[in-house]
Image: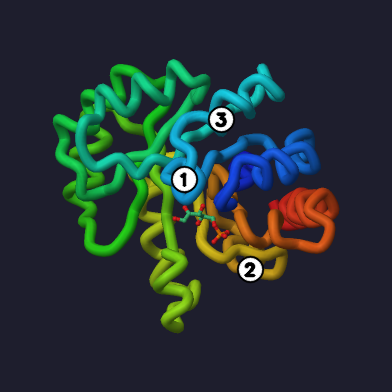
Amino acid sequence: MSKPKLQIALDSQSLSKALETVREVGDVVDIIEVGTVLCLQDGMEPVRAIRALYPEKTILADTKCADAGKTVAKNCKDAGANWMTVICCATIPTMQAANKEIDELQVELYGDWTFDQAKAWKEIGINQVVYHQSRDALLSGETWGEKDLTKINKLVDMGFEVSVTGGLNVDTLQLFKGIDVACFIAGRGIAEAENPKKAAEDFKNKINEIF
Ligand code: 5RP
């Protein structure tokens, strides 16, 4: 089992706020995500700005792309992103088109998806999925639990690198002990902490303690 990486999700409403956060935590985390909220607010500008600050880091554009895979992926790549996301209900042709343009494509698992679909993603060469508890599901009372762990384990057994995200905090990580999680993605748990750098370090320390 490899040690899970840590990804910061920058979901702020403005580029300036995202840059403030990333300057504090960029050296602590393994992967920097320009979150969906920020992509929708400012397009690819945050990707360009963060690439200029961190030439060597893996940058993910969380576009949750549903169509026009080739164009969206090319835009992400040209701006400096290594990875991007597509939503799980995108068609196979959309995923294939995106996958040709970007270094790594991740499928974001929301709502209803099936393991037959996951098998089809694997067959077209997709290796990464993001297991997601949506912000809105969590707000409406959903919690992390055994049902999630079973699905994550099954995806790992299928050969996927599985990132896990959605309202994570340092205490939630314990739940995933013994599971081959590739990466934990944290947004508000780091960015909205009183001291984001310390919060990111706390996540890292907890990952080292558990895995
Ligand atoms: C929302 C996302 C978020 O970036 C991700 O879930 C992390 O956010 P948080 O830790 O604040 O829940 O993809 O669609």
Image coords of residue 80 (percent x, y): 52, 20
* Vertical order, 109 against 73 (above or below): below
* Vertical order, 71 against 3 (above or below): above
The residue that disc 3 covers is: 59
Q: CA distance from mark 3 to mark 2?
A: 24 Å
Q: Which mark is residue 172?
A: 2
Q: CA distance from mark 1 to mark 3?
A: 18 Å
The answer to whether residue 157 is seen in the rendering is yes
Image coords of residue 97 (percent x, y): 22, 24
Horizontal arrangement in the rendering, residue 24 relative to residue 189 (left or right): right
Image coords of residue 12 (percent x, y): 59, 52
In the picture, the quarter occupied by the N terminus is top right
The residue that disc 1 covers is: 41
Q: CA distance from mark 2 to mark 1?
A: 29 Å
For image coordinates 21% across by 31% down, the residue present is 68
The three-letter amino acid code for the residue at tag 2 is Thr
Which colour assignment does the render follow? rainbow
Badge 1 density bin: few <14, some 14–19, many ≥20, Cα 10 Å? some
The disc, 2 or 1, on the residue closer to the chain's N-terminal end is: 1
For image coordinates 56% across by 52% down, the residue present is 13
